[in-house]
Amino acid sequence: ENCFEQSAKSYIRMMRPVTIIQAVGAFLVGRLVILTSSAASSSSIITEVPDILAASISIYLSYGAGMAMNDCADVAIDSVHEDKQHRSVASETISMRNASLFCAALSILSLIFSFRASSTGCNGFPVWSLFNLTVMALYALGLQRIFLVKNLICGYLAIAPLIGASLLGVGASNLGGDVVGKLYKLAIIGFPLQVAREILKDIEDVKVDEGTKKTLPLVVGEQKSKWIAYALVAVVNGTMILSPYFWTMFKSTPNVYALSVVIGTPMCIWASLLPLSEGQQMLKKSIYVLLLGMISALLNQAR
């Protein structure tokens, strides 16, 4: 590999390119729920594809910017963390100045694509994008050090793409009550899943966070925090399995949502039995499986 390729990979790694796909997935689920719940024809849905693509790119870039902001803010902690000291800024592969410029560039590009996604002239989506970037910057600059605020913000950012989906096109004011209800129910399962994963990550970081952050494991202990995290996961999985609402929302032929639940739920149970680091990674994968099932089911409905 030449110097340029190595440098490019270092910048891309700052964005957590795989992790932030989750945000795009949540947006697609939200937008498809809106489109399949309306009287929109297949042809009108197809005409919206360019806006959906631009919005997806905008979200991907903005969440990548948020990840890069965290690397800049946490450089001192990451540099002494066994699993994070290899990160681009912590290892000084990328200078703080260049990393900050990269964050700014991603943020600006994200806003450009957000305006491109708003072909109808409604600025709700760009305003939401700017708000999200502001939340990410404030999180990196200090909010992540406040007890539980870190977890709540991460939970919000996990479901925020559902809000973005409602603001695309003509905007949220034209959504029916049934559609808003569906988005709320999606948020109800997405929020606690992400909060649970953040708690598990906090347990991993308990040694380096001591004295710099006030996290749940530092306040109530590691074991109790793990119980709380997996209790949240259990409640979400129980809701998805026992509530007929989600089965109806994602009903399709073939029933890919059912398949994703059959695969994703055991993954969550397995995650609770694994060592901490492997467990939270397994939990992340189970979220991807469920998102894929939801998206596939909604695409089948739209055919």
Image (tube, grey):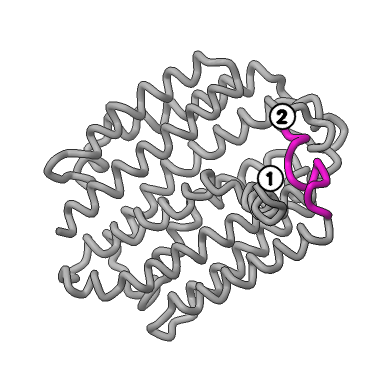
Q: Residue at x 51, y 24 (%)?
A: 230
User: In the image shown, does 259 or 11 lie closer to the viewer?
Assistant: 11
So how many labels did they put on this image? 2
User: In the image shown, does 26 or 246 lie closer to the viewer?
Assistant: 26
Q: Please check the rendered image and state whether residue 89 is part of the magenta-colored stretch, yes or no.
A: yes
- Report helix, strand or loop for mark 1: helix
Q: Residue furthest bottom?
A: 121
The residue that label 1 is drawn on is 149
Q: Residue at x 79, y 47 (%)?
A: 93
Tell me if residue 105 comes above or below residue 23 in the rendering. below
Q: Which residues are magenta?
A: 83-95
Q: Residue at x 34, y 53 (%)?
A: 29
Question: Residue 282: where, in percent of width, then height?
Answer: 48, 27
**Picture disc at residue 83:** 2
Disc nearest the viewer among 2 and 1: 2
Q: Residue at x 74, y 48 (%)?
A: 71
Question: Residue 289: where, in percent of width, then height?
Answer: 36, 36
